[in-house]
């Protein structure tokens, strides 16, 4: 019973997923994703059952923990804001898992994807190489050749960052790195600084914010308007 309480979602974690809009699906729903949908809003957007999302995150964490060497796990995303949290940054090179003549050839034991629709090429190679695949799946995602589909909103940087954050906490708890039930996000100053690595920061947005905050310098060589009030006259 104690183990079940540890694995059950807490109110703070559910609120985090709701705040990050992890439960917002698409306007279309694949028949294989209908089991993870709780209802549909009047505007046509499907809402994902966060309880199912939590169960799939726990299942994915168990699979990750079962692999002894973390280097045998490849996180291959196609979206730019997932590069920082991946072990194989950049777009997938065709033949990475099948062509032994390539310098980037690898034989991973697990493949983790952020979007099966965008990352269709790695999925095809995982089938040929008999590699298990885990992926974040939206309501309109294709589940073909995906072994573990985590139902969640996978379109934005906040959604994916929140999911990786929760999944990392589960893996650390199962490995015994942190005590179960402990607030691991504040257990050390170093780890608190690493939280930002889960969320992508657009350099262009940061530059615009810096320009908006920077004070406006006066134009060089500008001459103040002459009013004549300080003119000296002799009687």
Image (cartoon, rainbow, N blue to C red):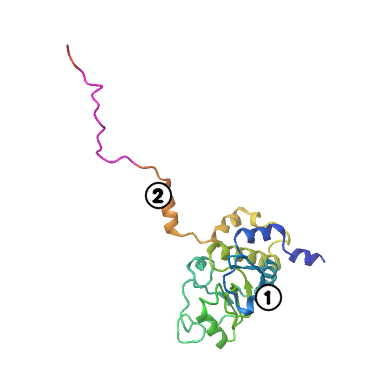
Does the magenta portion include 228?
Answer: yes
In the image, taking residue 84 as reference, residue 176 lies left or right, namely right
Above or below residue 39? Residue 196 is above
Say what secondary structure mark 1 lies in: helix
Q: Residues within 10 Å of mark 1 (few under 14, many from 20)?
A: few
For disc 1, the marked residue is 35
Q: Quadrant of residue 187?
A: bottom right
Q: Which mark is residue 211?
A: 2
Disc nearer the start of the sequence (2/1): 1
Q: Residues within 10 Å of mark 2 (few under 14, many from 20)?
A: few
Percent x, y of residue 42: 61, 65
Percent x, y of residue 114: 55, 72
Q: Which mark is residue 164?
A: none
Q: Main secondary structure of the magenta part?
A: loop
- Residue 159 shows up from this direction: yes
In the image, taking residue 218 as reference, residue 22 lies left or right, namely right
- Going 46% across and 82% down the picture, which residue do you hit? 94
Label total for image: 2
Name the quarter where the N terminus is drawn. bottom right
Percent x, y of residue 15: 66, 58
Percent x, y of residue 75: 55, 73
Of all residues shown, which one is farthest toward the top?
Answer: 235
Foreground residue among 146 and 64: 146
- Residue 68 shows up from this direction: no
Name the quarter where the C terminus is drawn. top left
Q: Quadrant of residue 158?
A: bottom right
- Contact, mark 2 vs mark 1 (Cβ under 8 Å): no
What range is drawn magenta here?
Answer: 217-232
Above or below residue 227? Residue 140 is below
- Going 66% across and 64% down the picture, which residue do you hit? 169
Say what secondary structure mark 2 lies in: helix
Of all residues shown, which one is farthest toward the left?
Answer: 235
């Amino acid at each position: 019973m104690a183990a079940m309480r540890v694995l059950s979602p807490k109110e703070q974690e559910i609120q985090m997923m709701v705040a990050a809009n992890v439960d917002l699906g698409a306007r279309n729903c694949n028949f294989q994703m209908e089991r993870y949908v709780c209802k549909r809003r009047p505007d046509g957007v499907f809402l994902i059952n966060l309880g199912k999302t939590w169960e799939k995150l726990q299942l994915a964490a168990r699979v990750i923990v079962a692999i002894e060497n973390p280097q045998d796990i490849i996180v291959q995303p196609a979206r730019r804001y997932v590069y920082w949290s991946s072990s194989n940054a950049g777009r997938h090179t065709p033949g990475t898992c099948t062509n032994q003549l390539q310098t980037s050839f690898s034989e991973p034991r697990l493949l983790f994807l952020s979007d099966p629709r965008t990352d269709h090429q790695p999925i095809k190679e995982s089938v040929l190489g008999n590699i298990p695949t885990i992926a974040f799946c939206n309501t309109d995602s294709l589940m073909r050749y995906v072994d573990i589909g985590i139902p969640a909103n996978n379109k934005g940087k906040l959604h994916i960052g929140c999911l990786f954050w929760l999944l990392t906490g589960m893996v650390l708890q199962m490995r015994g790195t942190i005590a179960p039930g402990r607030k691991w996000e504040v257990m050390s100053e170093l780890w608190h600084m690493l939280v930002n690595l889960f969320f992508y920061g657009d350099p262009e947005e940061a530059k615009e914010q810096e320009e908006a905050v920077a004070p406006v310098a006066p134009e060089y060589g500008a001459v103040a308007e002459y009013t004549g009030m300080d003119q000296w006259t002799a009687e």
